[in-house]
Image (cartoon, rainbow, N blue to C red):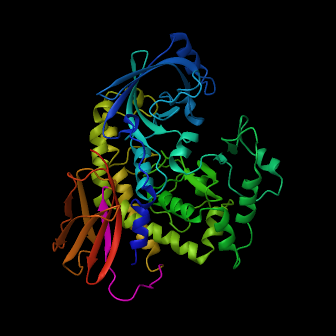
């Protein structure tokens, strides 16, 4: 199968701009956040489940090497259905009482409790898959949270999707950003903007909720997108929808949801996505969020490990991003290629299981000490450990690893034979797994299948084109281990040659 174009996209080409270093999102450590506020304020917003008003708090962040203190930070609860949970989720604002203030490049922190995940890692793991697939990075790391000297548990500190994130991710952050929640299914409701504004998720929030440029309250481009999306699929449709929507990003997001079992999404539950009207391209970008119901979690009595990857969307309700786009043969084949590449390269057990094990080991001390984690579903220490490999309860019918194994097998059987057999003339190189990417000290290169034309030559070049080093590899089974200790940070190109065929892989080197 011809995968080299996909590999460049999936494994770093869209992530050449490296994020600003931040201890807040250093996922090699479990930092600590300390919040201090009057006891009556804490009791009030916990008791009333207040998720709109911020209370003043002193904020301290300790990454083990440095300790920073900020006064007059804002603290509130976050979430909707999770407000009633015993283990609360929180939002911290650095600019609520100090306009314009940022800390380590961000204005807000979103601390997610993960109260319904016995392993506490599912959402973090999703965003790692999302990033490895070449999607816009949303940084996430684990943190221990203390409020008024009491340990409130282990949290996932997930980067806020706001103007700062837009500015870090896109060349222009002045476009309209819409937070889309149930029932934002993108069905056509007519040409009137107000019709879409009147569609509500709850009494206080629009289903298509404009989060930037609120004063203009302009929904005209969103209506245009929905209008074009829902047109009859004819010969002109692919070009017309591609002019206003980043179709490739939508297809890849859909494939990621299937590969990770994310059903609390647009495609099944018409929920939990953003649309950004990118001024730099004139097209809407699609971003998935709120991804804790993944990797085997279920609340709907559906077997997500075995569900048909080509019929993932809700069967009885409009989902034009799925039905319309997949009605275009070229888009459907691209979606299937993404499914195939994700399954064979990124969520492949050999690739992802070591990372799952490292996350498990990293958070164990903080998770075991987290008594709040036990209050909602009674998860004990054994459930925390077993959740990676076993069924825990009715809404976690799969451990993470068994789910990934079965989901991968199901996907490959469902799409078998559906990809175009067209290939470039001559020998096609096998699939290449390059991990981790970004890398620090070591890079591993593995070829699938193992029967390939030896020898293979690998050459590393700096982004400027300057040659760095090369290797000749004959081993048919074991991965090639490439040392990167001596290389400075930056973007490199890994050139792979065999039997007159070649391909190039983008590699990001970062500090350990």
Q: Give the camera-side residue of 459 and 336.
A: 459
Residue for point 72% across, 34% down: 204
Horizontal relation, residue 402 to residue 333: left or right: left
Magenta stretch: residue 332 in it? no
Image point 31% across, 69% down: which residue? 432
Question: Percent position (x, y) of residue 445?
Answer: 25, 64
Seen from this angle, which residue lies furthest bottom?
425
Q: Is residue 10 visible?
A: yes
100 w.r.t. 450: above or below: above
Query: From which residue to which does the magenta span run?
Result: 419-436
Residue 427 lies in the magenta stretch: yes
What kind of secondary structure does the magenta stretch mostly adopt? loop
Question: Which quadrant is home to the N terminus?
Answer: bottom left
Query: Residue 252, image x and y in percent?
Result: 51, 62
Q: Residue 449, relative to residue 385: is it above or below?
A: below
Residue 303, visible in the rendered structure: no
Tell me residue 419's x, y (percent).
47, 79
């Amino acid at each position: 199968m011809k995968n080299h174009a996909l590999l460049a996209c999936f494994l770093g080409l869209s992530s050449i701009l490296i994020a600003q270093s931040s201890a807040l999102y250093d996922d090699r450590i479990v930092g600590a956040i300390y919040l201090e506020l009057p006891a009556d304020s804490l009791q009030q917003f916990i008791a009333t489940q207040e998720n709109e008003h911020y209370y003043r708090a002193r904020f301290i962040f300790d990454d083990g090497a440095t300790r920073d203190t900020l006064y007059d930070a804002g603290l509130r609860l976050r979430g909707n259905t999770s407000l009633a949970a015993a283990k609360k989720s929180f939002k911290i604002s650095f600019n609520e009482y100090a306009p314009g203030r940022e800390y380590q490049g961000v204005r807000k922190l979103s601390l997610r409790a993960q109260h319904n995940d016995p392993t506490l890692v599912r959402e973090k793991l999703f965003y790692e898959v999302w990033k490895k697939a070449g999607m816009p990075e949303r940084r996430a790391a684990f943190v221990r949270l203390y409020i008024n000297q009491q340990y409130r548990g282990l949290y996932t500190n997930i980067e806020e999707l706001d103007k700062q994130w837009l500015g870090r991710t896109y060349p222009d952050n002045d476009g309209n950003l819409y937070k889309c929640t149930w029932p934002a299914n993108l069905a056509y409701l007519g040409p009137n903007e107000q019709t879409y504004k009147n569609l509500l998720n709850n009494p206080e929030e629009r289903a298509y909720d404009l989060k930037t440029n609120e004063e203009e309250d302009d929904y005209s481009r969103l209506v245009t997108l929905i209008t074009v999306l829902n047109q009859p699929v004819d010969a002109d449709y692919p070009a017309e929808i591609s002019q206003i929507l980043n179709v490739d990003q939508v297809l890849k997001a859909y494939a990621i949801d299937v590969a990770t079992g994310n059903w609390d999404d647009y495609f099944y539950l018409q929920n939990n996505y953003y649309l950004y009207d990118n001024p730099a391209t004139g097209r809407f970008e699609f971003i998935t969020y709120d991804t804790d119901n993944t990797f085997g979690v279920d609340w709907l009595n559906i077997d997500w490990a075995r569900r048909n990857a080509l019929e993932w969307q809700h069967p009885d309700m409009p989902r034009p991003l799925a039905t319309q786009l997949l009605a275009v043969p070229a888009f459907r084949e691209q979606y299937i290629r993404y499914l195939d590449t994700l399954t064979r390269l990124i969520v492949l057990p050999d690739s992802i299981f070591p990372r799952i094990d490292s996350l498990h080991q990293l958070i164990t001390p903080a998770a075991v000490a987290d008594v709040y984690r036990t209050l909602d579903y009674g998860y004990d220490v054994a459930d925390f450990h077993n959740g990676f490999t076993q069924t825990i309860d009715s809404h976690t019918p799969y451990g993470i690893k068994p789910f990934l194994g079965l989901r991968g097998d199901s996907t490959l059987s469902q799409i078998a034979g559906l990809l175009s057999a067209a290939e470039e003339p001559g020998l096609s190189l096998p699939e290449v797994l390059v991990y981790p990417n970004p890398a620090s000290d070591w890079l591993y290169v593995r070829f699938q299948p193992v029967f390939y034309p030896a020898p293979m030559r690998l050459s590393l070049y700096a982004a400027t084109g300057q040659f760095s080093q090369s290797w000749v590899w004959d081993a048919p089974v074991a991965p090639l281990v490439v040392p990167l200790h001596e290389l400075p940070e930056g973007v490199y190109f890994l050139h792979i040659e065999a039997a007159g065929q070649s391909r190039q892989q983008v590699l990001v080197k970062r500090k350990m």
